[in-house]
Amino acid sequence: MSKNTGKIIGINGNLISVAFDQPVVQNEVGFAVVGDTRLKAEIIRIRGTSAEMQVFEDTTGLSVDDAVEFSGEMLSVHLGPGLLGQIYDGLQNPLPALAEQCGFFLQRGTYLAPLDNKSRWTFTPTVKKGDRVRAGDAVGTVPEGIFTHRIMVPFRMRGEYTVETVAKEDDYALDHAVATLKDERGDTHDVTMVQTWPVKVPIREYDERLRPTEPLVTKIRIVDTLFPIARGGTYCIPGPFGAGKTVLQQITSRHAEVDIVIIAACGERAGEVVETLREFPELTDPRTGKSLMERTLIICNTSSMPVAAREASVYTAVTIAEYYRQMGLNVLLLADSTSRWAQALREVSGRLEEIPGEEAFPAYLESVIASFYERGGVVRLRDGSVGSVTIGGTVSPAGGNFEEPVTQSTLKVVGAFHGLSRERSDARRYPAIAPLDSWSKYPSVVDDEQVERARRSLREGNEINQMMKVVGEEGTSIADFIVYLKSEYLDSVYLQQDAFNEVDAATGAERQQYVFGRIVKIIDTPVQFEDKDSARRFFQSLTQITRDWNQARMDADEFKEIEERIDKMITEVTDYA
Amino acid sequence: MHKVYTKLDRIAGNVISLEADEVTYRELAMVRSDLGDSLAQVIRIEGRRVFLQVFAGGRGISTAAEVRFLGRVMQVPFSDALLGRIFTGNGEPRDRGPAITQNMIPIGGPSVNPAKRIIPRNMVRTGIPMIDVFNSLVESQKLPIFSVAGEPYNPLLARIALQAEVDVIILGGMGLKHDDYLVFRDTLEEHGALSRTVMFVHTAADPTVECLLVPDVSLAVAEKFALEGKRVLVLLTDMTNFSDALKEIAITMEQIPATRGYPGDLYSQLAARYEKAVDFEGAGSITALAVTTMPGDDVTHPVPDNTGYITEGQFYLRNGRIEPFGSLSRLKQLVNNKTREDHRSIMSVMIQLFAAYRETLEKQSMGFRMSPWDVKLLKYGERFENEMMDLSVNIPLEKALDLGWTILADCFEPEETGAPSRLIEKFWPKEIVKKEEEKEDQETATK
Ligand SMILES: Nc1ncnc2c1ncn2[C@@H]1O[C@H](COP(=O)(O)OP(=O)(O)OP(=O)(O)O)[C@@H](O)[C@H]1O
Ligand SMILES: [Mg+2]
């Protein structure tokens, strides 16, 4: 069979125009050939006998008439055991292996196998000869770290099959055929432990999608209590530069109560990934006692890496997330930053000379963002088990102004909004999630009425604070002043959380319920002071003690002791009138 | 040999186009005009039509200008002979020294594999308390100075360069005023640092787009030195001029601007340069300090805004001082736990009190009554501004920490500072306490 080959007729940045004469497919991958180097590219528009392709590499040195070899395949990822713990670029190139081969620098046109075909895995069959199976059904399992990894009938195999043979329990290489299946026409198909799937197509081998209602506990108090996330839900974190988006995601990736975390570092600083990359192998996951890296996968296409691969990286990440969801696992995908991916779209759209929308983003930006977040969800699989993909994306709005296309398009589709404020980060009130502007549609881990009470306190405190800026402390009544102090207290000891203190950094759901209950009760307790100064002093020391409380382990004697001291302090100022 | 063409069909701004064969993307060409020869680079190919960006600008170019393709991309020489020398943005001597043409290396090379990066760990000492104490600079950090035009950002850069213990200094000047360039040169010379410095200077008098090459040339050379094990400090001033040159080209190419005329890829363009900052395991490092002037003192302007999203913090230079609020070194926590045990506490205590001082100033300006606490803060704030923030202060970190305690002790009671008691016991200056007591004793005695 002759290869389908085209010819370059134009080059504009990472966009090339290619003339072809045999049929091509939208989103098909091709390779531009320059010398001995083959540069991966993807068809993004077809018009007449020419196609526009975005090249996933630097296009320096390409020339008109250079050949482009079409592959016939859409941009795909390899799925199989061994993905966890890996560090890939946006096209699923394993970066550590690449470093071994090429040294300090990335080398364009070098593509390595995402999974090591020769690696061996202990396969246990779960079907027998004669069983009827469909795409997504397991034929067996292998242990992958702490998980039971299902070896599934490839998602791309349509229709029903009969199991012809299945391997007995033993160690096999990844590319070994562990089962053969016969289709309706009698043709047989080998099933190995790896399959491929096009990244831009959602995996849909499940019975039904469920509503995301179960809280995903992040152990960040302001999130779980006020602006919760649900398993299978979606949320976004917009914020100006330096407000704490990345740190928030880093903390979440450590403490979140999920099975697997996929980090998509999309067009941001390489240095930030390095911290995760170097620290995670050393950290233990309190839930499993194993290294955190065993449940983590990093897709890393940082800001100086090719822009088109940046766009691919979020799809690579979400496809791998869906794959593990098919095993009945709860997966959390953290993308930092979705704005960089939107900018990659904008760059290409500009080169395609499409009619631009606001701020030169393409008119289809909104639908692209919507269909990406749509890939989050909870599903009931055909065997009755439930798996989920939760998606959290940061947004980096130009000028820190949320009235811009990426933030606005994202807000329309997500279930929770954690807006970071410059004011709070400047005041070092971390995490800098703005408590009056953020929202969530998911259920909280604490009592709803208490949440309402807390919100009221924050609102009233804010109003009084605004007023005080005009009339001064002198012009404020002591009653109002106390309302203000209480809201500040709630903010300081509950909403703010010290990411660097071992205990305070992660507050489990049970502790949140307990502590929040106590604090709301304090807010509800009428208190009495002689003057504003003594009120201020009282709340200052109460804040200090409560912060110490936050740093005490819940099962330590200290925890009880401090709690008693807090009680005593409150009793002394309670107004029993 | 490469063909020579003499028929331009379009000249617009700094971009020319012509029909040519066998041209490769980003290839260089030499364009001859009455005003002299200029390098040009291929920025787009459409069939036989080739678009070139002319670094010396389109002015004076004839439709019959001679265009000779060079069959190579932009290169810069690399050797120790560069040290002590001054070049233009495209690598020609600006001093009276000989041209260097051996050992040419390409510019704008690929990025470092993230898996090969290491966590930065060495502090760069500058002798400037606002940096060393409050926002420590770290080897391999990328960090801009944000300021309005007219602030002394260039002297500040020069001073950091002189004080930092680095092996090689590379200055990339973009739209640099001729005077500023001379000041740089003379300052480095005076302090005997010129011999470890390479300068690539594009001045305000040169064609605007010529400055586009400066960051890539500077960083390519820096990268080579770093791979040889040298600790390199790259100074890029002013990146706003670089961004404006990008804008000019984009507009000429009729690209649809994203915000305020700047192209949508401004972020990627800036990131490609800043991300060259690196610490090579087993070799040297590149630390990148840049200047970003903010038109209209507006930090939401696309250039500072995109920069802030890329760099690892920023120093705000305002009224000749590094402003503690808004300034941020995102890497400081990697080093300030290994200096002296009171470093972090002095840092946070002094800043919190300074924030309180600013609030008091506000209250004062609104005519509210000053409490005794406010009076203390006012005294503290003034000392802090004069003895810590003033850029003429030049003391090592340890001295600055000691000074911090002295100022605190002069203005407050220990428990008012919120510093941990453990540190107060160890560092709170005893003499001052004694002196004060003596003074009080005397006062009571005289009464
Ligand atoms: N929860 C936190 N606790 C303590 N410090 C924090 C916290 N969040 C952020 N910071 C501080 O703020 C700095 C910037 O945070 P981060 O890198 O997360 O910002 P960002 O919003 O991701 O910015 P960018 O958009 O530029 O990437 C950190 O380096 C750290 O010094
Ligand atoms: Mg970030």
Image: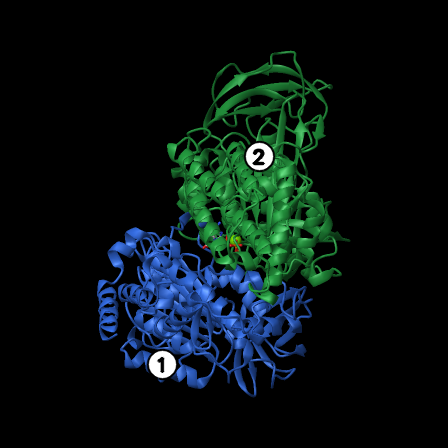
Tell me if mark 2 has few (under 14), some (14-19) or many (20+) residues whose alpha carbon lies within 10 angstroms of its own.
Answer: many
Query: What residue type is disc 2 on?
Result: Val
Label 2 residue SS: strand
The chain coloured green carries which letter? A
Q: Where is residue B350 in the image (x, y as percent from the top left)?
A: 38, 62
Q: Position of residue B421 (x, y in %)?
A: 31, 52
Measuring 35% from the left and 74% from the top, which residue is drawn there?
Answer: B159
Q: Colour of chain B?
A: blue
Q: Quadrant of the C terminus of chain B?
A: bottom left
Quarter-wise, where is residue B445 in the image? Answer: bottom left
Label 1 residue SS: helix
The correct choice, above or below, for A568 with respect to B33 in the image is above
**Residue at numbered disc 2:** A331
Query: Considering depth in this image, is A574 or B213 the residue closer to the camera?
Result: A574
Q: Is residue A487 left or right of residue B139?
A: right
Q: Which chain carries label 1?
A: B
**Residue at numbered disc 1:** B185
Measuring 44% from the left and 67% from the top, which residue is drawn there?
Answer: B374
Query: Considering depth in this image, is A431 or A350 the residue closer to the camera?
Result: A431
Query: Considering depth in this image, is B151 or B73 the residue closer to the camera?
Result: B151
Cβ(mark 1) to ligand 1 < 8 Å? Answer: no
Q: Which residue lies furthest to the bottom in this view?
A: B34
Tag 2 and tag 1 share a subunit: no
Query: What residue type is disc 1 on?
Result: Arg
